[in-house]
Structures are given as C-alpha cells and as structure tokens.
Image (cartoon, rainbow, N blue to C red):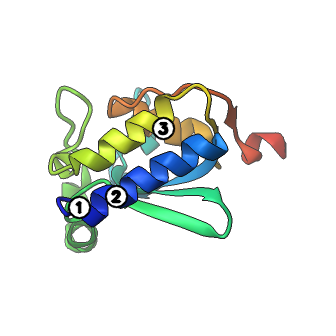
Amino acid sequence: LSSKSARASLAAVEAACRRLRRFAFALHVSQAHAQAKRSCVRPPYLGATLHGVAICCEPPVVYYIPLCADSVTRESEVQMRSPESLQPQLSADGTQAQDQEEIKPAWRCIRAIMSDPTISKAAHAMKEQLALLMLRGVCVDGQLHDPRVAGW
C-alpha cells in the first residue's frame, strides 16, 4: 500500500463510511488452529490469523482491505504445514507472528472507522470478529448490529 492510488482508495473507503455513517464488515481469517489442541482458557477463534477485511458501505460495492503484506502466500503455507505446527504464535501485544508484516495505512484506516462512535457497524458473528480486532489493538465504538443475534 505504498502507492498513491492505494492510499487514495483507503481514503475513499474511510470517506464513504463517514458520509453514510454505517457499514458492514467481515474479517478474512484462516483457522490454522483448527487441528491444534483446544484450550479451556482461550476461545479457539482467538488463534485465527487475520489477513484482511471486507467492508460494504453501499451495496453492491464491497471493498477488500488486505491487512498483511503477503496473506495469499501465508494461507498456502498454512495448508502445507503439519498439524503439530499449527499452534498460533502470539507475541506480547496479542498479534501473531503472521501479522507482523502489517500494512500500516490499512490498519490506520480500520482503526479510524472502527473507533468512530457516529458510524454504525454490522457484522455476522460480531463477538468473534470484535475479539480478533480488539486483540490487535483496534477499539470499536458506536452502534453494533449482529444479524446472527437478531435472528435468534
């Protein structure tokens, strides 16, 4: 995301979210921990690797923001590893080793729109998605809507 066009695209996404004051999102994660030993202390979804986020402000337009520099390569590497090596490697701040090459402008955009209390946010399985974001230092504020809970 070092190009001017990529930064302009991020600015356009942020402007659209602020203008419409609502958006729906879905995190792109890989569940590499699925075959790893389960823990009773830590929910299993917290071990997921975060690759990007899809944001929809105004259907049918959906924006995909990659949050790791080489998420496509990493996903194929995960599939080829043995089950014993699938344990997530968390650092002290909660990020995973796979997340270390984050794309800083993308994270700034995500933090800005997620922390804005005037923007309403919607996501399926909101609890799990918010936990993954908060684990990575993203504060979420504003109205939250989860159709999974609303349908219950």
Dot 2: element: helix
Image quadrant in which you'd find residue 89: top left
Q: Looking at the figure, which quarter contains the C terminus? A: top right
Q: Which residue is mark 1?
A: 4
In this orientation, does residue 30 appear? no
Q: Which residue is mark 2?
A: 8
Query: In the rendered structure, are the residues bearing label 1 and label 2 in contact, judged by CB atoms less than 8 Å apart?
Result: yes
Q: Which mark is residue 113?
A: 3
**Picture coordinates of residue 148, whole percent (x, y):** 74, 46
Residue 96 lies left or right of residue 31; in this view the side is left
Mark 3 surroundings within 10 Å by alpha-carbon count, few (fewer than 14), some (14 through 19), many (20 or more): many
Q: Specify which label sits upstream in the sequence, 2 or 3.
A: 2
Residue located at (21% from left, 37% from top) = 90
Tell me how far mark 2 sits from mark 3, CA to CA: 15 Å
**Picture coordinates of residue 34, whole percent (x, y):** 40, 56
Mark 1 surroundings within 10 Å by alpha-carbon count, few (fewer than 14), some (14 through 19), many (20 or more): few
Dot 1: element: helix
Observer-side mark, 2 or 3, equals 2
Q: Which mark is residue 55?
A: none
Tell me how far mark 1 sits from mark 2, CA to CA: 6 Å
